[in-house]
Image (spheres, helix red, strand yellow):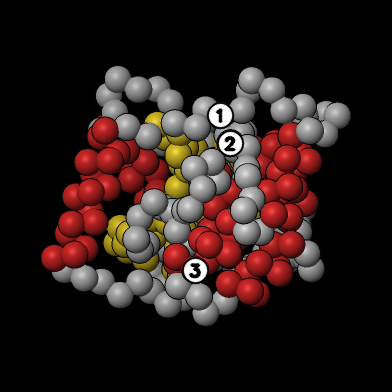
Amino acid sequence: MAVSLPMEANPETMNKYLQRLGVSNKWRMVDVMGLEGDPLKWVPRPVLAVILLFPLSEHYERHRSQQENELQIKPQQPPKDVFHLKQVLSNVCGTIALVHSVANNINTIDLEDGILKDYLKSASGLDAAAKGALLENSTHIFRAYEEVLNSANNPANEDSEPVNNHFITFIHKNGNLYELDGRKSIPINHGPTTPETLLDDSAKICLEFIAREPDNIGFNVVALVPAQ
């Protein structure tokens, strides 16, 4: 079983990790400095994925339970062409968010041969639970992150995010905005979007998360965009 350190919620660390996983340096994570107005315009386009970091809380758990109950009442088939995996280990949501970001844009990102490409090939055709179990045992993927943290220029220290935070990913697929959360049974369809409006539409959902936590400031948003 693989053991992972909590993900750091900063683009520099994420970018080093992505490159170790085989993602071309043509793509990078950047901070989204605000969720309304001009800060959204400052983000380079096209945006391939948006990642939200937020605090795990009773508000989140209640909302998640409500969504799961609604899905039981009105079952939905998960979209076959959306790559979604279930979280097994407690500290791997950051890695899962990055995997979701890359795996659902594999036709756009030049993914080099290596550990992530091998994982995605092995995960092809598996359901979300099996994808999660496979990731759990993908020691090389988690070791790559530990190597980033332990590198001379980026030592692992108290700056690591506490484990009571959680990462989720938003992507565009076939005209819809999907929320990919490893703690949820299927992707959540938030309605229509386009590649051009993915960031703006994701920002609206992020604001809903923030509105449910009026006394908490532990939110951060990053986006996968072209390197400039």
Q: CA distance from mark 3 to mark 1?
A: 27 Å
* Residue shown at 66% from the left, 67% from the top: 119
* Residue shown at 73% from the left, 40% from the top: 146
Residue 161, label in figure: 1
Asked whether residue 25 is in view, the answer is yes
What residue did someone put label 3 on? 130
**Residue 107 horizontal/vertical position (percent):** 62, 72
The three-letter amino acid code for the residue at tag 3 is: Ala
Q: In the image, is 166 to the left or to the right of 213?
A: right
Out of 42 and 1, give the one closest to the viewer: 1
Which marked residue is nearer to the observer: mark 2 or mark 3? 3
**Residue 52 horizontal/vertical position (percent):** 46, 41
Q: State which tag comes first along the sequence, 3 or 1.
A: 3
The three-letter amino acid code for the residue at tag 1 is: Glu
SS state under label 2: loop
What residue did someone put label 2 on? 6
User: Is there a contact, CB below 8 Å, between mark 2 and mark 1?
Assistant: yes
